[in-house]
Image (tube, helix red, strand yellow):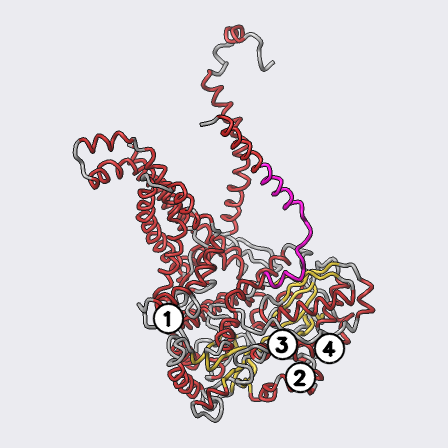
Amino acid sequence: MDPTRQHDRRAWRTAALFLFVVGLCACRGDKSPPARENRPGAAATTAAAVSEAPGEKAIKAQPPAVPNAAEAKRYAGSKLKYYSEPVGVGAELDRVMIQQFQKDTGIEVTIIPRPKDATETYSVYQRLFQAQSGDIDVMMLDVIWPGAFAPNLVDLSEKLGEAAKQHIESIVQNNTVDGKLVAMPWFTDFGLLYYRTDLLEKYGYQKPPETWDELEQMAKKIQDGERAASPNFLGFVWQGKAYEGLTCNALEWIASHGGGAIIQEGKITVNNPEAQKALARARGWVGSISSAGVTSYEEEDARNAFQGGNAAFMRNWPYAYAAGNAERSPIKGKFAAGPLPHEPGQKSAGTIGGWQLAVSKFSPNKDAAIELVRYMTSPEAQRFRATSGSFLPTIRSVQQDPEVVKSLPFLASAKDIALVPRPSNSTGARYNEASIAFFQGVSQVLQGKDPKEALGQVEQRLTRALR
Amino acid sequence: MSMPANPAATSAAAPPDHPSLDARRQRRAWLFLLPTLAVVAFIALYPLAQTFYLSFTNARLGTGEPASIIGAQNYVDLVQDSYFLDAVLLTVLFTVVTVLGELALGLGVALVVNSRFKGRSAVRAAMLIPWAIPTVISAQMWKWMYNDVYGVFNDLLVNQLGVLDRNVAFVADPAVSFWAVALIDVWKTTPFMALLLLAGLQLIPHDLYEAARVDGATALQQFTRITLPLLRPSMLVALIFRTLDALRVFDVFFVMFGNRPDMQTMATYAQQTLVSVSNIGYGSAISVALFLIIAVFIMIYLAVFRAEEA
């Protein structure tokens, strides 16, 4: 071979290596944070890339101006980190509202999408607090967490106490620990049954199912009929993955069968015949009116199936209402929401959800953070979130606002629902352990284990968690 | 004076208490090893000892109360914990299935890639792609392909080929989810196995095959009489690597199944207890048990290895 060519090639290689190293240095040197607008979108891709439902990118309405801008401007230039909604409409709303907040106040906010799975979010917070980390300023708290995290949260009563008086008292009470208001109510939630009005009509049903038996019959009939055209059509979708959402679903099944809450007045009552019956019923759905895949579904998986027109019934939170009625949604105007079914003689149950906003005690910018919370939980913001995302307001006057009533018609039926709290009062800081014990037991039943045996094990694990 | 100018003089002056060349070399070797040992002690031994200690306490995050020593209570709980026992069984089953599958496939791939054909180096490079993708990403990728509604496998099997009459929930259905996850691991680590075996194949001298051919041995005879026996040391190394890796498997199960109780490995159960539940004491006991179980496997392999060498 020609020696000069050999030489040439070596030179090329050296040059390429040199360029590569220079490139690496250049990349590492670029310490500026990525463009903020891209953050939520980029992080949301895990769920969204394959299952983005049509229409949810379109938040047309303008977010409200910041009412407390004058006060907040004093902290212009502060930098905040906000643990926000990870996916879906909520993430989209967060994005536009944070943009508005930055524009009006000059406070810089970095949106950090929290883990999609609430169980994981809980452990992320726990570790950040254990490390006394200042990397988190404003965060979303599930309704069951204020008790567990109270020692690490700022007392908001001095600055936001007055504003808190507008909110539903029981939630404010829930967020008040040892006389300190540790979190502001942001939105509230309870489980709802969504149903396709057009399909009910097509198959000759006048009204939505009231009992579980009715639901099963209707779902079966509609599923059998629709499968002729779309082979993957499902009767009923819900949240069956082994995570916090399954705890919420199973609490509703058990309560509406007359099995009560799983822990009542500090006593573990989970292993009772009604609860066993409820779980046995749910196991019967897997592979019949629900696909076998339902045991890997979270909220968004269920919503994608329903909103894509591939399911007749769905159990989900109120947010799915606005998403289903979005501009390009295939089921727009073809569905309604109401109370979940129950056993004859029992009441419909809905697990209480809902999220709060709180400020970390270790935040270096507490004042600016409180202003962000003030904005996000203000009547204007709650009204906007209710009409654009069907997030239930926690302020009574906003709930009664005609605009809001129009966009959340299912609120009227809420009085028929027995609201079921999760057992966070009895478990305190051990809530995650108790919830994992419960949803894992339920998950085993869904995979085919005998309900009595599984609930016996749940009972044992709960006893250990509470000892 | 540590370094005398005249070695002959010193050796003459104090021969009895002066260390021999061997001993001096050994001391120097230890001196050179010292930094490494210090680092190992700091990053491996210290956390291990700490975990061992914590496994005898009731330490928890987020309680405020200080941890106290509770003796072997955690271990007593552990042997009665059906979730842990299920996790051990699942992990061992997973290890046996995937390692054997990878060994068979990896051997096949190594033999093909070891033969001469056009574009061999391109194939060798392409073969490594599954191994190069981070497991969390490939697991998520497979999870999408497995999806019961929009997954590509269901589309292929049901719509394109018509092998099945209805969609299968690969991830959710307890009857198939184990095999689904085992397939991901086999897909991902067969290249690694193949690479190690390929290195072993290249060590086998060519003249052995030439001699065999002259003697009229068939291809099968060449394989069983020459290739397999000479490949055994490499195979053993590859098996040790893969077994230990498979026993520690975490990421693929975590992405695919989260906290699903019937699909927990020892490592995901330890993570759940340590991180989600924040029960540091019990979680440490699980970690120690995991460590001991892996140690048992290592000892079995080492015994086999010794016997092999002898």
- What is the chain letter for disc 3? A
Q: Which mark is residue A380?
A: 4
Alpha carbon distance from label 3 to label 2: 11 Å
Q: What residue type is labelled 4?
A: Glu
How many neighbours does mark 1 have within 10 angstroms: few (below 14), some (14-19), or many (20 or more)?
many
Q: Which amino acid does label 3 sit on?
A: Gly
Visible in this render: residue B161?
A: yes
Which quadrant of the structure image shows residue A325? bottom right
The residue that mark 1 highlights is B167
Visible in this render: residue A276?
A: no
Q: Nearer the viewer, residue A450 or B225?
A: B225
Alpha carbon distance from label 4 to label 2: 12 Å
Alpha carbon distance from label 2 to label 1: 41 Å
Determine the residue positioned at 52% across, 72% down. A299
The residue that mark 2 highlights is A404
Q: In this view, does B129 lie to the left or right of A376?
A: left
Label 3 vs 2, first from the N-terminus = 3
Q: Are marks 4 and 1 in contact (CB under 8 Å)?
A: no
Alpha carbon distance from label 3 to label 4: 14 Å
Badge 4 element: helix
The residue that mark 3 highlights is A389
Badge 2 element: helix
Determine if marks 3 and 2 fall on one subunit.
Answer: yes
Label 4 vs 2, first from the N-terminus = 4
- What is the chain letter for disc 1? B
Determine the residue positioned at 46% across, 59% down. B141
Alpha carbon distance from label 4 to label 1: 46 Å
Determine the residue positioned at 36% across, 46% down. B297
- What is the chain letter for disc 2? A
Q: What residue type is labelled 2?
A: Val
Q: What stretch is highlighted in magenta?
A: A18-42
Position above or below: A436 against A20: below
